[in-house]
Amino acid sequence: MTAVEPADPAQWRGLAADPHADRSLAEDTEPEAVARLRVRSRALLADVLRPHRARLGAAVALLLTQNAAAMSGPYLVMLGIDRAIEPLRAGDPGPLAAVAVAFAAAAGVEYGARRGFLTLSARIGQAVLLDLRQRVYAHFLRLPVAFHERYTSGRMISRLTSDIDSIAELVDGGVESLVMAALTIVSVAGILLWLDLPLAAVTLLAFPLLFWLSRWFARASAAAYRRTREAMALVIVHFVESMRGIRAVQAYRREARNQDIFASVNDEYRRSSRHAFRLIATYSPGIKLIGNVTVAVVLCYGGARVLGGDTGVGVLAAFLLYLRRFFEPMQELSQFYNSLQSATAALEKLAGVLDERPQVADAARPVPLPRGPAHGAVTFRAVSFGYRPDAPILTGLDLTIEAGQTVALIGPTGAGKSTLAKLLARFHDPVTGTVSLDGVDLRQVADAELRRTVVLVTQETHLFGGTVAENIRFGRPDADDGAVEAAARAIGAHDFIAALPDGYATEVHRRGGRLSAGQRQLVAFARAFLADPAVLILDEATSSLDIPTERLVQHALGTILRDRTAVVIAHRLSTVEIADRVLVLDDGRIVEDGPPAELIADGGRYAALHHQWRDSLL
Amino acid sequence: MAAGSDGGPADRGEARRHPLNNLWRLRRYLRPHAVEFSVLLLAGLAATGAGIAVPLVAQRVVDGPVADRDLPGLFQLAGLALALGLVEALLIFIRRWVQSSSSVAMEAAIRDDIYAHLQRLPASFHDRWPSGQLLSRITSDLSVLRRFLSFGLFFLILNLTTYLVVVVLLVRLHPALGLLVAASAVPLFLITRRFGRHYHTASRRMQDQQGDVATLVEETAQGLRTMKAYGRGPQLAARFVAGTRTLHDTGVGKGRLLARTAALLDLVPNLTLGVVLVAGAAAVANGRLTIGQLVAFASLQLMLIWPVQSLGWIIANGQEAATAADRILEVLDTPPAIVDAPGAIALTRAAVRGRLRFEAVGFRYPGATTPVLRGIDLAVEPGETLAVVGATGSGKSTLLSLVPRLHEVETGRITLDGHDLRDLRLTSLRRLVAVAFEEPTLFSMSVWENLTLGRPDAGEDEVRAALALARAEFAYDLPWGLRTRLGEQGLSLSGGQRQRLALARAVLVRPAVLVLDDPLSALDVHTEALVESALKRVLRDMTALLVVHRPSTIALADRVALLEHGRITAVGPHAELLANVPAYRALLSAEPAVAPPPRSPAGPAPGSSPLVLS
């Protein structure tokens, strides 16, 4: 974030509650946090690789086989020239045939081993990616709403798409080059030492240089790739947000300004990745340079040694040949190291997400809710809550709702109505005090049971990709088609659904693009109805309905809410009229509480609102 | 729920032109970097030459000075080797350095262009395309393309050059054997062609599935609260598992394809070497070839292994890049359906009186069989406020979206002061028309930026007045006042607060035509009354089209149009319609007794508790 803001003169982004509000652990740049994430990301890597130990072993074995077969090629050529030509001249094709068969066999083995290795490594790589995707996704689902409000959807998308992509890049070709290069370097180093110790010692002098250069690259590129990951996340955030709000963008001719903003975040990404590529552009030739200088030095020193009679010409020749094979894989290794750094930066981000502990954690030892007729009694005891510590929304709220009671919450914007609803649905946990259901603290109820028992319907209705029926069935996945239709009928959604091109099987398309806001609310209602919870919370759930439809919904609610606890938040007092009890909330406090008729008679705030509302009707 | 299969990228698997056609079309992004690309190609070739020269020099050291016990000669040649080594490293540095800026610059340029194009494409396009599919094009596909432009293409040229040079050398060394080696290009060609074809299909499938997974993720992010509210994590997770497993399987299949080809590309030069060895040995035995020639031939031939081996990866990379180019151009090739007509004119605000007329307007969503709107005739006089009333799903919001041309009329026309909207410049039209949507969209930007979306030049007083009108003064009390960041990444506001900001935003534009879609639905009765009276004053100076559900809001309107199943069935003052049109009365009356819900075969269960109406 901070990377962009100073560069932008217009400060379009504005100020957030805390400059790091939209960061999580995963976006942390504090040195100790970075160090911790490194450790966590390595642990994560080890963890995802662990189930594939056997396969990895097999892959390495195949690679060694392939390498041995490949190495035998030149040897067989030599054998053919040295041993087969003379017999052939003498009229004996046997040795040549033997060499040819051996050669064909080696080529066959190499083919099989290489094919096997590549197939196996693709399997391992894909399995690791699958595992990572699923782990991170599942963890995102577990994290509470409060986390997502902070983390934002764009960043979540970025983690699961572009970060995984950069790990995939490593997986695609990394393992082979790593193993082969390491193998070659170690074996060649052994041969060099065996050939000529002093000459080898001179060669090995290059190692501290290589080490120093690599350490510089490791540090610099880790920081650089971390920056590219963050820059990419910003690009994605801005992209997703403007595509989602495209109607507003076009209606207000926002395109040019948006383009400027996008260009600036895109340019930040361009600069950060250019920086990262320039590091490898320095590192890789640096390695080459060290290798070439070493060759020249060996040439001088080795030549002098030959002249001095300390070693043979053949040894020098072999040494020089092997030296080449020694530094060549270093190039590949540096390339691999580069992909590794990029993937590590991504892996750190994922590890940061996985490290995030749900503040609204599932109970370790859940207490089952008591079964019985009095199912759905809600108690708020001394509940205080605020999204930020300096701005409390509820302070010391006490409230008891009897099982089966329908309670309407009334009050001005910002009074805390929605917050109360969210606490009851356990989107958040209270800062102090408890919210309990049938005497059990919500924190001790297993999430699955809580969700079965308490359902919150808000005015923002989300439809998932798929059919209308699937969206209604979201409320109860095991419901059959009959139950889905019955739910739709009960709240008056059946007619419009039946009129859709494919009826219940109509795809709702992207974010319900073709259903009107009111129709979406009806689908959401049917979903809640089908879920059949003991406690139903409706937060402005009928705001987009026309009056007859709303009336129909209310009529249905009369049935639906009769045997369950309900909390209804509505500006339209018509919805409130079905309530047994009205609570007027102001500034986080309950200022009026009683049956609607009583409150009207008392002439308080509800009475005034009610009066005004009656006047607004026909 | 098969994400992505819902009509978005519809032309998947369509018979297309040459697979590389689209990649070739992207060359325009290479053009500004032509000089850089030639520099890096030259540097790359020179570096390869220097790299080959170093061992040759080393060889000469062994054969020359060392054998001749010539110390100065030794140092001379070693110095040459050092110089060559330095040059090689420097050339590699130059190549990579140049590459690092040009490849990311190309990537950024394409991304900017895609974004710009997507902003021009109409709402109907965005309705059809899952945004995950769009996102994967500006992320995954672009990085594939970048990798090809910075590595694949370069090595393709370099390795082909190496291959040709070596084959020519081989033919010169020994024509018969050389031609034998050259003939091995035939199976290589067949293998790579077959591979290219299969791999193209596989990588297309893979990249599409990546887009599907991105769509699933995007949708989960969107529907997170709903998921939480119903505790449906496991269900979504199962869907995601299915999506990623498909992706995994495609990835494994692709890996298997590559493994087979890469291994074959290894086998062919090996077998050629074997044949050369046998034939060569026979030739040596017959005295037609010296041993030295055979050794030279074999070692030269070994140099072919790497270029051939790498062919598999390069082709894979190239195919992926071709697929990426296809996917990117699918978006860039979609013509923006709603654009300025040739000779479109711009109207100034001052010159517009604001007479809005719908003439026989019909509209259907792309791919839908039944029209949403049919034969709409409607006139709104300058300064008049017309309310559109209709049942849920009757087409009210669609009607409104035609005015700023977010969607285009299918039949008939809409005119503003007699000008067909299609004859006006889009920017001009959208400056004259301001819209507040049913679902207020706030961006992750400051309050100020969000408010001045349509009027970046608005002054402080105007903003203050607009906020006052929409009863949105709460904005000043936010932690940083109007500089507070809103939206997903900032402070979250209640539905009512957002709606009031959206209203202030629309009013701030001081449009000729104000279009409000159920603008007060989330406000409480008290605030609604206050906003209404303020709005009433403003609406006197502009033409307004409102969608409303509540009788209270209808008080704002001079006339009301009743929309039923996509047709206007009645127009007139509220009182008149109320008295004469039963359907209208049914729609607005709070008394269920007046008219029972018109379309409700499934009423509540008999004996259910009646509505409590005081």
Image: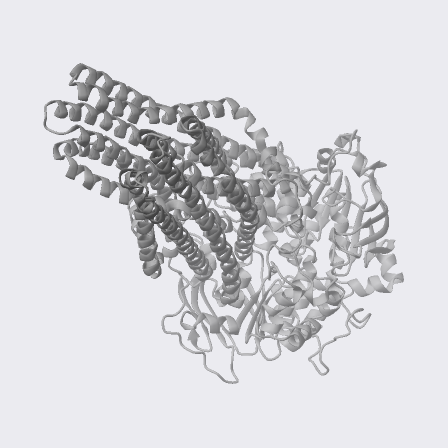
- Is residue B139 visible in the rendered structure shown here? no
- Provide residue A128's location: percent of width, then percent of height: 40, 56
B545 left or right of B82 in image: right
On the rendered image, what quadrant is the N terminus of chain A found in?
top left
- Provide residue A181's location: percent of width, then percent of height: 30, 42
- Provide residue A222's location: percent of width, then percent of height: 34, 40
Q: Nearer the viewer, residue B177 or A612?
A: B177
Q: Quadrant of residue A616?
A: bottom right
Give the farthest residue toward the top: B72
Q: Quadrant of residue B166?
A: top left
On the rendered image, what quadrant is the C terminus of chain A found in?
bottom right
Question: B549 above or below A13?
Answer: below
Q: Nearer the viewer, residue A95 or A159?
A: A95
- Is residue B454 visible in the rendered structure shown here? yes
For the point 74% across and 45% down, the residue is B407
Q: Nearer the viewer, residue B379 or B323?
A: B323
A242 left or right of A574 in image: left
- Provide residue B228's location: percent of width, then percent of height: 51, 64
Q: Quadrant of residue A184?
A: top left
For the point 84% across and 64% down, the residue is B583
B222 left or right of B47 in image: right
Question: A396 above or below A273?
Answer: below
Give the farthest residue toward the front: A91
